[in-house]
Amino acid sequence: MKALIIVGSRDPKGRTARSAEAVLEGLKSQGASGEVIFLTQQKIERCRQCDVDGWGICRAEGRCVIQDDFVAVVDRLRSAGAVVFANPVYFSDLSESMRAFLDRLRRICRNDAGKKGLAGKCAIGICVAGGGGGGAPACTVSMEKVLGNCGFDVVDLIPLRRQNFEMKLDVLKTTGRWLAACPSSQQQ
């Protein structure tokens, strides 16, 4: 099984990236593999809300008119056995890069063609807060709502804060080991 890990942070050595690496380590320990994508290294525009009703072909056809890296990332999502969304918490919510990606993803998923290859796929959300850390739980709620709207089987949401980060790395490795055997991942 190959998992796709989507990271909404721009710091490849920061806590969010280290969280993704811990999950990847757990996956690899079970013979699975993973690919990490940093959204900030991709060219992904925000939704344009194409027509006067705020929609476009996303609703009618399950695809987006914007020609950027979004389509390639979604194709990799569809071919993955499972997916992990690792997000740094800003203002108790998703990072701007994660928000831009997930806003467009949930729009194409309003159509069955957009959900193809995503519906029922095991997904894990990780929300890593700095500062006081209180925003991580609220961020997981936001992530769960969006991922659920896209049709993912959200099997776990993990809030972290800088104060418990080192301890939670073991939790993330265990989660990676467990994700390697996720039932919906085996169907991919």
Image (cartoon, grey):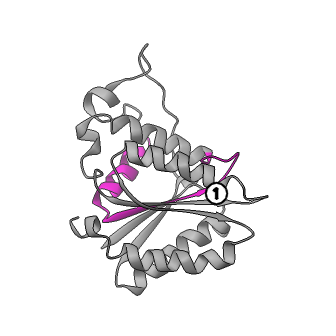
Quadrant into which the N terminus falls: bottom left
Residue 17 in the image: state x and y as whole percent: 60, 67
Q: Which residue is mark 1?
A: 10
Quadrant into which the C terminus falls: bottom left
Magenta-drawn stretch contains 126? no
Front residue (pair 28, 132): 132
- Where on the picture, by quarter, is residue 160? bottom right
Q: Which residues are magenta?
A: 68-95
Residue at x 51%, y 37% (from the top left corner): 45
**138 relative to 105 in the view: left or right:** right
Q: Is residue 69 visible?
A: no
Magenta-drawn stretch contains 85? yes
Front residue (pair 73, 30): 30
Residue at x 36%, y 50% (from the top left corner): 74
- Where on the picture, by quarter, is residue 137? bottom right
Q: How many marks?
A: 1
Residue 161 in the image: state x and y as whole percent: 69, 64
